[in-house]
Amino acid sequence: MTRKPIHNYQRPGTRISKDGCTVFARLRIDRRVFERGRSWAKFHSAADPGCTAEDIIEGELNMDGQKAIDREGYEAPADVEANYPKPQPASKTAEEIDDDMPF
């Protein structure tokens, strides 16, 4: 069976936010991944009662994606990269940043 080519290599329901920094997509995941996310949401519920399995999974997916970007040295197209300015070097040392907080 031959699959029909997909325009822009994304599903039809996928949407990009107005600021260009977030993508809303429906994903299919393993049920165990979902249940693990739900257990973490329950664990964190005292501190964040509104936390959901989806929140946990989104956060983990985002972190894993960022690690892959860093590891591979990937750069998105210029119009997308423009939304993510490169960090400037710190103007203070670690000792100056502590704001006189006792550790």
Image (spheres, grey):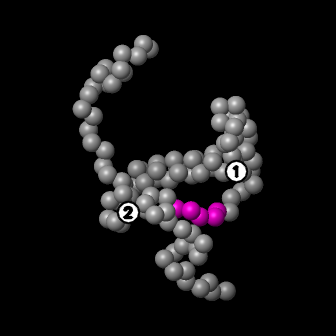
Residue drawn 31% across the image and 44% down it:
87
Q: Which residues are magenta?
A: 23-27
**Residue 37 figure quarter:** top right
**Residue 45 figure quarter:** top right
Residue 22, position as x, y percentages in the image: 49, 58
Asked whether residue 37 is in view, the answer is no
| Residue that label 1 marks | 33
Query: Is 71 left, or right, of 40 in this rendering?
Result: left
Asked whether residue 12 is in view, the answer is yes
Q: Amino acid at mark 1?
A: Val
Q: Residues within 10 Å of mark 2 (few under 14, many from 20)?
A: few
Q: Amino acid at mark 2?
A: Val
Residue 57, position as x, y percentages in the image: 63, 49
Q: Residue furthest top?
A: 102
| Residue that label 2 marks | 80
Give the structural element (helix, strand or loop) at label 2: helix
Residue 72, position as x, y percentages in the image: 40, 55
Residue 2, position as x, y percentages in the image: 63, 86
Residue drawn 49% across the image and 63% down it:
17
Q: Quadrant where the N terminus lies?
A: bottom right
User: 102 and 76: which one is in front?
Assistant: 102
Q: Main secondary structure of the magenta part?
A: loop
Residue drawn 33% across the image and 24% down it:
97
Question: Does the segment drawn in magenta span residue 26?
Answer: yes
Question: Does the segment drawn in magenta span residue 84?
Answer: no
Vertical relation: 95 (above or below) 61: above
